[in-house]
Amino acid sequence: MRPEMTAASLDAAARTSAERGALARARLLRGLLPALSLALVLLAIAWLNPRAISYFGFSLMLNLAIPIALATIAQMFVIAGNELDLSIGTFVGFVGCVTATWLKDAPLIGAAILLGSIGVYALLGALIHLRNLPSIVVTLGMSFVWQGLAILVLPKPGGKAPDWLLGLMAFKPPFVPFPIIAALLIGLIVHFGLMRTSYGVILRGSGGNPAALGRAGWSLLKTKIVLFALAGLFGVLSGMALIGITTSADANIGNGYTLLAIAGVILGGGEFVGGRVSPIGAVIGALTLALAASPLLTFMHIPPDWQVAANGAILIIVLAARVLISRKER
Amino acid sequence: MPRGNADIIRLNGAEKHFGAVRALAGVDFHVGPGECVGLVGHNGAGKSTLMHMVAGTLTPDSGQIGVHGDTEDNYSVSRAQQLGIRCVFQELSLCPNLSVAENTRINHASLRGFGWRRKASDLIAAKLDEIFPGHSISASDIVADLSIGRRQMVEVARAFTVTQDRLDLVILDEPTSSLDAHTAGQLLAFVRRFVAGGKSCILISHVLGEVLRNADRIVVMRDGKVVVAAAASAFDRDRLVTAMGGAEARQKIAAEIAAAKPGASPLRVRARPAAQKDGTDLVACAGEIIGLAGLAGHGQTDLLLAIFAAASRAKAGIEVTAPVALVAGDRQSDGIFPQWSIAENIGIRSLARLRNGLLISPQREAELAAFWQKKIGIRTPDMNNNIFSLSGGNQQKALFARALGSDAGIVLMDDPMRGVDIGTKLEVYDLVREEAARGRTFLWYTTETEELDNCDHIYVFKNGRIVANLRRDELTEEKIIQSSFGDAA
C-alpha cells in the first residue's frame, strides 16, 4: 500500500529531520562531555608539567584509577536501577582488609567470604525491593556494618596482598600503561554487558519505567537483585585492585570512594533517576576524578589543604556544563 | 465447546475492591474472534480495572476468567501474553531511556542472543510502516526524544508485533488520545484490517464517534457494572451518551454561549508566535475563551509556554496583564507531583494564600481542597490520599482545581482533556464557561474539534504560525482542516 503524501506529512517529515538533527547534535555533545573534560584535565597537566605525559608519568598518575573506576562501575549499576549505594566506600575497605588477611593466608576461606559478601549485596537488593525501603537508608546502615567488619578483620593497618595480586597489578605492558588498558577493558566489557546484550536492556529498563517492565512480565525483584549483585562484584574487584596497588590494607582505606563513585557516574553522563547511565562515561569520569584529584592540583601548586575544595570546584564546573548542554537539548 | 469459535476471553462475575472503593461489581464480559468491541463509560466506571484483568495485571477478588474456552486459575501477564492477549495502556508504558528497538525487546522474551537488536529493529520498523505509513520514526531513536504522539504510535505498533507467541486480542485504551486526525485515521483503518483478518480488538475511547464507526459491538459501563451491551448499529451518539449517564446534551452548551456575549473588556493577552512573519497577533480579553486549533505539534504548546514565561519575565512580542496558570497536557510528566496527596497537588499554585506566617497552614490547604473536591467533583474518600489513588480523569480534575483555585486571571490549557471521559469533560466545560463569565480568560489548545464549540474565538496554527482566525459562528470542522492542511500564506 502506497501512502498518499499529503502536504502535511511532507512538512512533518521535514520538520522531524531538522528536529532530530538538533537532538542528535545535543546528544553527541553531551556524550562527548566526559571525554572533553578528561582531555581538558590532560591538557592542563601537559601544560603545567610536560614530562608527566609519558609512559611512566601515566602509570604513576593513574595508579589509583583502576579501583576508582571499578567502584564507579559498581555505583553505576545501583544508579541504573534508580537507587543509590552509600556503602560502596566502606565495602571496598572491608574487601581490602579481607584481601590482605584471609585471602592471602587462607585463600579458600577468603574467597568464600568475598563471594558471600556479593551474596549480601544481592540480598540487600531483594530487601530494598520487597520491603520498598529507600536504598539510601539501607546502604547508609550497611556502610557502618562494613566498616565495623573491616575493623574486626584488621584492627590495625597492615596485612599483605597475595603475591598473584601484586604481580597482576604491577604488570607493565609495552607502549601503553596498564591503568589505561585496564580502564579500556573495564569500560568495554561493561558497555557490552549493559548496553548491548538483551538482558542489559531489561536492567536499564527497570530504571527507566519499572511499571512498564512489570506489565511486560519481567520480575523487578530479579533485576534489582542482579543490579545489586553486580555492584557487589565490582566492589569486590575494586577492593582487590586497591590492595594490589597499596600492598597492605587499612579499615578506612576506601572511605572516600563512596562520593568519588557517585561523582564519577554523574560526571560520566549518568543521571540519578531514569536508568540513564553510561559505562564508558563512568570509567572516563573516574579517570578524570583520579587525575583531577591530586596530580593536577599538585602541579598547580595548590597546597594539600585546599585540594579537596579545588576538587569539588572542578566537579561543579563540569556538572554545570552538563546541565547547560542538556537544557539546550529541549 | 468447540475450540474453533470459542470466545477469546470471557469473564464471569468479576469483582474488584480497592479498599473501600468498589471498582467492579460482578461484571460479565467476553470478546469473540474477529470482532472489535467498543468499551465506553465515565472515568471511574471500571473500564481500566476490567481491562487490567483481561491483560492479567490485576486479578479479580472473585469471578472466573476463561481464555479460548479453558478456565484460567493462575492468570497473569505472562500467561496472557502466551495466550495472545496484549494491552496498550492509557499511561504510556515505554521506557524513555531506551530506544524504540530496545523497547520492543522488552515485550518479547524471545528477542535475545546474537543479532537480537537487528531483529527487534526490523520487527518494529515493519509494523510502524504497516500501521502508520510515512511515520518518520527510526528504530534507533531514543523514546525520550520523541513527541508524545510518536510515543503513542510506537506503543501501539509494539503491541501488534509478533514473535513466538500468538496474537489474538489487542486492548487499545485511548489509543488516539495523543494522535492527530491523520494518524488516528491510519490507526483505526489498521484496526479494521486487523479485525477483518479474524483477530479481535477492544477499543476504549472517549471520542464516541470513533467507537460508533469502528466497533462491531459496544459495551457501556457505569459504576463498576455493564449497563448495556449491544451491536454498534443499535447505538447512535445520543443513545450512547444517555446510556453512560452523561450529563446534558451538547446543544445546551451552544445555547449558553450564544446567550452570554461578552462586551468590550480589558485586554489580557496579546501574543505573536516566534515564527509569525505577518503582523497577526493572538488577542485575548477578560472573560474570553480562546481556542488554539490545528494539527498536533504545530506551535500551539510553544506559544502557551511562551505566554506563561512572559507572565513572570517581560518578553518581546508578548503582552500579559494578569497572573497566569497552566493546565498541562502531559499530566504524568508536567502536571502531577507523584509523591504528594491530592490536596497538596491542588494547593501548590496558591501557596501565598495558604500561608500562615512562614508555614503552610494545613487547615487552609484542606479547606481549599475540600471546596474544589465539591465544586469539580473529585471522586475520592479522602483528599489526603496520594494523587495516584485517583483515576486518570480525576487526576486531571485535580489539575484543573489547581489552576482554577489560584489567583490566575489567565488560564492556559495545553490539550488537558485527552483521555478524559465525556461526563467529566462536560462538567469541566461548564466550569470553564462559568469561570469565563466571571472574567477569567482561557487559552485552550485542543486536538478535539468538538471542544472548540466552547470557544469565543479560534486561532488555527500551522508550522508555528497562526494561519486562520475564526469567530465561533464561522467555525466548521472543514475550515479548520482546510487551514491546517492548506498552504500557509
Image (cartoon, rainbow, N blue to C red):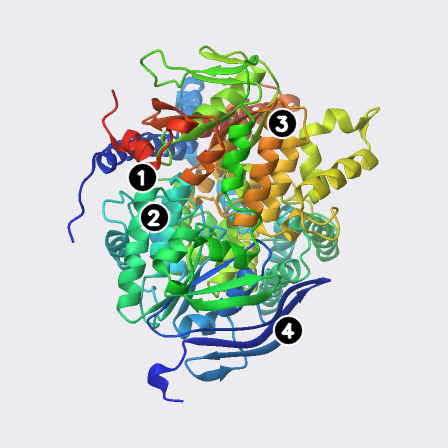
Asked which secondary structure carries label 4, the reply is loop
Q: Looking at the rendering, in which quadrant would you find the C terminus of chain B? A: top left
Residue in the image at 37% along x and 55% along y: B156
Badge 2 element: helix
Residue at screen point 59% across, 78% down: B63
Looking at the rendered structure, the kind of residue marked 3 is: Val
Which mark is drawn over residue B61?
4
Q: Is residue B373 visible?
A: yes
Q: Specify which label sits upstream in the sequence, 3 or 1.
A: 1
Residue B359 appears left or right of A2? right
Q: Amino acid at mark 1?
A: Phe
Check the residue under mark 4 and report the chain it is in.
B
Same subunit: marks 2 and 3: no
* Residue B484 pos. (x, y %): 30, 31
Of marks 4 and 1, the one in the foreground: 4
Taking B67 as reference, is B310 above or below it? above
Which quadrant of the structure image shows residue A131? Answer: bottom right
What distance separates the C-alpha of mark 3 from that of mark 4? 59 Å
Residue reaching furthest to the left: A2
Residue corresponding to mark 1: A175
The residue tagged 2 is B184
Q: Is B44 located above or below residue B6 in the figure?
A: above
Q: Which of the two marks, 1 or 2, is nearer to us in this view?
A: 2
